[in-house]
Image (cartoon, grey):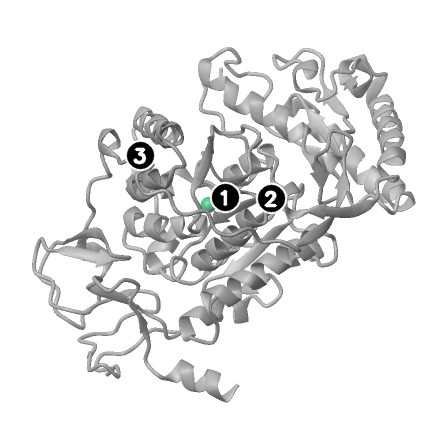
Amino acid sequence: METKSMQAVEPLYIKVHETDNVAIIVNTGGLDKGTHFPDGLELKERVPQGHKVALTDIKENEPIIRYGEVIGHALKTIEKGSWVEESLVKMPQSPELSELPLATNIPKTLPPLEGYTFQGFRNEDGSVGTKNILGITTSVQCVVGVLDFVVNRIKKELLPKYTNVDDVVALTHNYGCGVAINAPEAVIPIRTIQNLAKHPNFGGEALVVGLGCEKLSPMRINPNGKESDIISLQDQPGFAGMVQSIMEMAEERLIKLNQRQRETCSVSDLVIGTQCGGSDAFSGVTANPAVGYAADLLVRAGATVLFSEVTEVRDAIHLLTPRAVNEEVGQALIKEMDWYDQYLALGGADRSANPSPGNKKGGLANVVEKSLGSIAKSGRSPISGVLAPGEKATEKGLIFAATPASDFVCGTLQLASGMHLQVFTTGRGTPYSLAMAPVIKVSTRNSLTEQWKDLIDINAGTIATGEATIEEVGWEIFRFILDVASGHKKTWAEHWGLHNDLALFNPAPIT
Ligand code: CA
């Protein structure tokens, strides 16, 4: 403990790459004007925690370099030791999509990692669940009020009888009617609802609640295609009849789900999602590289690892296309970037809509700096596949699953891709979680972990203070993933029963 407090007092900055001309301040609360660093650097002014200090004089229009990459140009001369505040940084152009190198620097496949397993629920189709959940799918928002009422009763009256079932989750959304269901981009929300219903945590059991007059027919999203799995509220004798029918159908399925048993499964059965939310300047040097290390361990053990968030990849895409396992995968990456560029342009927005005010307060000047830190989550493996939003993952290895960066939308789409568990890094702090799969929260800073002891699962802030290495925290994340996937340990969000709503990505018109 003594060393810890000593470390906290000593002024500390982190320079990521040898060519960087800025570094970020580690100390909680920031550092005052006049602070001397052991290497002789003196602060010309106060610099907040996580914000950048100039390591050399940076003249007007000269590049500002972090992670060995240009994150912007100086709008006026910044003296050595000064705060490189966001308003001094002019954002560079995004990499041109037509000029990217494809599969030119494919990383060497890391040696296989053997001897690790987890306890999962094997399904008839060969997939594996990490939880045992009754999932109730909906074809339209109109049914949600009734369904919420019934889910409350199921939790109180039925679930206690079936102790082997973890939860009942209603897959609710605002799609289904009043939407341009034949528009080309409607494929995204429809595919998402279809694939959510097939999630391996639901054990192959299906229950679909529809209204009866909606555009999205319940059969279209019914995973097993059986009429007997669908209940249509307009056919029921009043509210009491609706409640009774859904309760009866739920109980039939709970009886079957209750038979499921955990068995030893290979790590290659896992689909692990990664995401960041509420990022700060530490994200790219502590939590994200540690998650990247864990991602490499998972890939080495044969698992599928998803990384996402197009707007936080776009400005670092020139570092990703060379890692594509072949040109086809490289082209697929570009296709998703291009689609999103057009989607943003159509809405009159561009990438400057990201980062958030909180990101900026945490020291991130712009989306270029945010992206360079964000892609650290992808580790060092070759990129072996690309999924369009809401597509199901079928391949092993590191996969780019295209999603918006919005936490809930990314979470929902990764669930549709079959994600068993999400590793979520945060610097500013968010209590975000999901009902269908656990979310492990990794903090970028010691101070956030101390502030949110009962929400943060893993602290990567120790990497900034030198108390732990990226490898050590990476292994901690990897082992915790296997414990949570096995049901041996719970995340804080599971402990408290926290979860956000599902949030569909619907780029098609609403009518
Ligand atoms: Ca996010």
Residue type at numbered disc 2:
Asn
Q: Is residue 243 left or right of residue 89?
A: right
Q: Between 311 and 318, which is closer to the camera in this rendering?
A: 318
Number of other residues with Cα within 10 Å of mark 3, as a class: few under 14, some 14 to 19, many 20 or more: many
Residue 456 in view of the camera: no
Provide the residue designation for mark 1.
Answer: 407
The location of residue 206, given as percent across then percent down, is: 76, 26
Residue furthest toward the right?
161
Left or right of 437? Residue 314 is: left
User: Residue at (27%, 62%) from the top-left corner?
Assistant: 17
Residue at horizontal 70 percent and vertical 14 percent from the top: 219
Where is residue 97? Give x, y as percent: 26, 31
Q: Secondary structure at mark 1?
A: helix
Q: Is any part of residue 289 visible from this angle?
A: yes
Are the residues at dot 3 and dot 1 in contact (C-beta closer than 8 Å)? no
Q: Which residue is mark 3?
A: 102
